[in-house]
Amino acid sequence: MGVVGGWATEEAKPASELPEKFIRMTMNPDRPRIPQSLDTSIIRFVPTDEKLAKAGVTVDLIGAIHIGDKAYFRKLDRSFRKYDALLYEMVAEKDETGAAPRRWKDRDQPSPKATEADTGKPDEAGEPSTSEEKGFEAGMTVIGGMQLGAKDMLGLSFQLDGIDYDAPNMVHADMSPEEFAQKMKDRGESFFTMFMQLFMEGLAQQRANKQGGANDFALLFAFFSSNRELALKRVMAQQFATTDILDTLAGEKGSTIITERNLIALEVLRGQLAKGKKRIGIFYGAGHIADMSRRLVSDFGMKFTGEKWVEAWDLRSKPRRPNRK
């Protein structure tokens, strides 16, 4: 498993013509109806400032899918070594010693703040209450459980187990759990409203069938397939490659989970550029890349110059071994 093609270099394009899809499903060239792989993209930007461009400044947006083949994460992890700074997403506690931040579930003492009901004292102004923090932890638990459940069902690996976050060039570019919870409160958001928004958008797309995605019958047949793991991977790959429901979270009003975290990541990018780092990668979920790429053009004076694809899921049928007599 490797890169699907090299850099497809193009002339710089305006923001309106930036790539729109960052996950794709490829088909077997000899049997066009048979899936071959699910791929994620890496898109490259360079400064429009000729001096910076000649100095070799590049920013790669590396769209991730959080569960994938082990070979996918190994390939990405090796490629990360070439960057002067690799910015990554992880809602996690910042480590004051400079080590990789700790995921919220790995914290030694998640210390929720007491509420007026617990102490007789009002909450500090603007800070999340205990119930809100519990709601945040419940939401994180649901997301983590969904990812781990899908990983096991599809025979895949989890991103956090396949990437070396302790590498010296890795730079945390995300919120802490407390910052995330506070920003959701400021926006009047919750995990429940977010899930409902995505659920309703998914239903609307399914009714319209505008994406040509997998239907309920395909999923049902996959569960009863003789090779259930591969059949389910193919159904889920089609869904990943055709859905655009995350676009609703990066729309006009934006959201904490997409927009606000992108703003944090790009502020970290600004700091790395100020330090003189030239080869920079930003490793974020593929759902973040459309908004992030537009901001590189509008806020950083950069231009899109090329893309390449990395195989995340192998969807090929394995040849059956002959039965020994």
Image: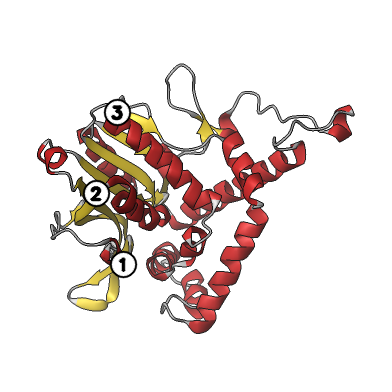
User: What colouring method underlies this structural image?
Assistant: secondary structure
Q: CA distance from mark 3 to mark 1?
A: 31 Å
- Whether label 2 touches label 1, CB < 8 Å: no
Name the mark on residue 25.
Answer: 1
Kind of residue at disc 3: Asn
Q: Quadrant of the C terminus?
A: bottom left
Residue 124 vs residue 227, the one in the foreground? 124
What's the residue type where badge 1 is placed? Met
Viewer-side label of 2, 1: 2
Q: Which residue is mark 2?
A: 302
Q: Which residue is mark 3?
A: 169
Whole-angstrom CA distance, mark 2 to mark 1, is 28 Å
Q: Are marks 3 and 1 in contact (CB under 8 Å)?
A: no
Is residue 48 visible to us here? Answer: yes
Instruction: Name which quarter of the figure residue 225 lies in.
Output: bottom left
Looking at the image, tell me whether mark 3 or mark 2 is earlier in sequence order.
Answer: 3
Q: Given the image, on which type of amino acid does mark 2 rest? A: Met
